[in-house]
Image (tube, helix red, strand yellow):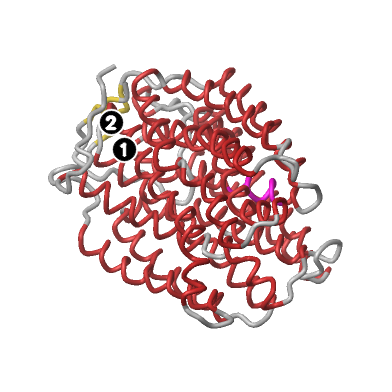
């Protein structure tokens, strides 16, 4: 396979789009995880219990599940420039609300709404897929995801210091509000400086909107099955916040939410049938087919890679602080090492996939990920701090590289559905985050890490058994009816 070469420091043509887009993603993560390194201060100001702190961690990733599905559809229909700009603009306001909250209930609502900003990742996947060819798309998506994901590490490294520099007791409020201002400003910059495709290129849109297109009966039923965990995870969150646990929701409200989730799944299933009913009456032409099992396996792989990253980034500063007796600033800096690896590891995962094969790369990285989390499950106060950090960063290398490997494949499944494929995989990342954080609310951190390791083994089995290496070409039909072949090898 031809080696991918990018002009890293260029700010022209597709590299200009890459840089502007990863910065947008960086800011979205900076806003999304602005609370994690400040949890000790927030806990002290509002007198939060440990269960309330853990509830905030879960709420932060809950709304991102449906948001990534919705944003995936919107970006395929309206283009990434409009959707990313709007997302950054709207996300600033719950950020301001969180900074001004004076009760746990207010804070919980704003944290839940802020989960929407996490859907920004999906937008950039489609944007980069439009601007880079198959031989470079793994590396380009890796740079976008890795450098953008670094926003969470940047938040961990800078926000505690910024809160201190504001020189007031509630300095954390000003630090968090500042991230909202940054989001507002960049929303305008992004809208004015990017285009959806290179000049002269066609932006392919789905033939039908409202659900993902599938191309066989078996894929239809697999699609319905893969939607169930998205709703089940929201039901799990409702149970966690309900009368049996944190008591933030009454029995009546929880029952209503359960009913709404069942109704929404039923409505979506009907919509999926309306979009795809033709697969029961006629054979889909060969040039339009794709294997939905590719999407399903990528969903599971992203559940254990990105899902574990979200969960670990949320809890790691407090884990280091409580385990080793560190200050808030020191714990934030050391914990940032987990996300810091994004700068090199995620592009590395994409690059290795481009060079040595996407399926083979995924297998190796999932093996390393499972081993890394097993080692993290052994960390306790008897460890030297430096060794805990080394093990954490080593595990993170496989986590971030695995994410890069997943999204080295996503743009090669079906071009006109890239936003929706990315949205579903991204939503599964949040399914993993909610599931893992829910586990954390019941067990010690060491057991939490062990659960992730075991889950990674299940994902590895799915990749070995079902994932196919992308080969040949994708086929898309131009608006005038002519056929365009898009290389995926």
* Residue that numbered label 2 is attached to: 136
Q: Is residue 65 above or below residue 175?
A: above
Q: SS of the residue at dot 2?
A: helix
Q: Are marks 1 and 2 in contact (CB under 8 Å)?
A: yes
Would you say 463 lies left or right of 103 here?
Answer: left
- The quadrant of the image that shows the N terminus is top left
Measured as percent of width and height from the top left, residue 144 is found at 35, 44
User: How far apart in space, not on screen, are marks 1 and 2 (Cα)?
Assistant: 6 Å
How many labels sit on residues?
A: 2
* Residue 218's disc number: none
Q: Is residue 119 magenta?
A: no
Which region is colored magenta? Answer: 430-437
Q: Residue furthest right?
A: 244
Residue 436 part of the magenta-drawn span: yes
Q: In terms of image quadrants, where is residue 447?
A: top right
- The x, y position of residue 276, in whole percent, is 49, 39
Image point (50%, 46%), residue name? 339
Residue 410 is left or right of residue 140, and the answer is right
Residue located beneath label 1 in the image: 140
Q: Quadrant of the C terminus?
A: top left
Image coordinates for residue 189, horizontal then vertical, percent: 25, 65
Towards the viewer: 325 or 98 = 325
Q: Is residue 163 above or below residue 229?
A: below
Residue toward you, 193 or 292? 193
């Amino acid at each position: 396979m031809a080696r991918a070469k990018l002009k890293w420091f260029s700010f022209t043509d597709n590299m200009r789009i890459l840089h502007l887009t990863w910065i947008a993603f960086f800011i979205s993560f900076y806003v999304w995880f602005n609370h994690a390194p400040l949890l000790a201060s927030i806990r002290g100001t509002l007198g939060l219990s440990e269960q309330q702190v853990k509830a905030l961690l879960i709420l932060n990733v809950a709304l991102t599940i449906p948001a990534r599905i919705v944003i995936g559809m919107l970006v395929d229909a309206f283009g990434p420039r409009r959707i990313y700009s709007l997302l950054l603009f709207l996300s600033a306001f719950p950020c301001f609300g969180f900074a001004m909250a004076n009760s746990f209930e207010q804070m919980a609502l704003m944290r839940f709404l802020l989960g929407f900003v996490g859907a920004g990742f999906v937008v950039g996947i489609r944007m980069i897929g439009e601007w880079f060819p198959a031989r470079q798309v793994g590396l380009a998506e890796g740079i976008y995801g890795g450098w953008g994901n670094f926003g969470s590490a940047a938040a961990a490294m800078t926000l505690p210091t910024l809160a201190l520099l504001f020189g007031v007791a509630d300095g954390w409020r000003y630090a968090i509000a500042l991230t909202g201002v940054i989001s507002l400003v960049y929303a305008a910059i992004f809208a004015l400086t990017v285009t959806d495709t290179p000049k002269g290129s066609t932006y392919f849109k789905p033939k039908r909107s409202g659900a993902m297109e599938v191309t066989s009966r078996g894929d239809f039923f697999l699609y319905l099955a893969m939607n169930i965990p998205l709703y089940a995870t929201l039901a799990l969150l409702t149970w966690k916040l309900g009368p049996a646990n944190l008591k933030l929701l009454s029995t009546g409200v929880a029952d209503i939410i359960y009913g709404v989730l069942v109704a929404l799944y039923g409505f979506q299933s009907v919509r999926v049938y309306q979009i795809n009913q033709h697969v029961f009456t006629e054979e889909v032409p060969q040039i339009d087919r794709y294997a939905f099992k590719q999407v399903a396996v990528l969903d599971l792989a992203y559940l254990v890679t990105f899902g574990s990253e979200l969960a670990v980034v949320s809890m790691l500063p407090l884990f280091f602080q409580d385990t080793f007796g560190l200050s808030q600033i020191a714990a934030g800096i050391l914990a940032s090492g987990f996300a810091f690896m994004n700068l090199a590891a995620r592009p590395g995962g994409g690059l290795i996939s481009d060079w040595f094969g996407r399926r083979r790369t995924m297998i190796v990285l999932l093996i390393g990920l499972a081993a890394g989390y097993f080692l993290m499950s052994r960390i306790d106060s008897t460890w030297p701090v430096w060794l805990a950090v080394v093990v954490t960063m080593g595990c993170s290398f496989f986590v971030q590289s695995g994410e890069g490997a997943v999204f080295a494949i996503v743009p090669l499944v079906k071009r006109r559905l890239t936003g929706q494929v990315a949205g579903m995989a991204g939503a599964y990342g949040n399914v993993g985050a909610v599931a893992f954080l829910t586990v954390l609310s019941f067990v010690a951190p060491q057991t939490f890490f062990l659960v992730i390791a075991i889950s990674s083994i299940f994902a590895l089995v799915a990749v070995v058994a079902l994932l196919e290496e992308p080969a040949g070409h994708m086929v898309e039909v131009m608006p005038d009816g002519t056929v365009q072949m898009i290389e995926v090898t």
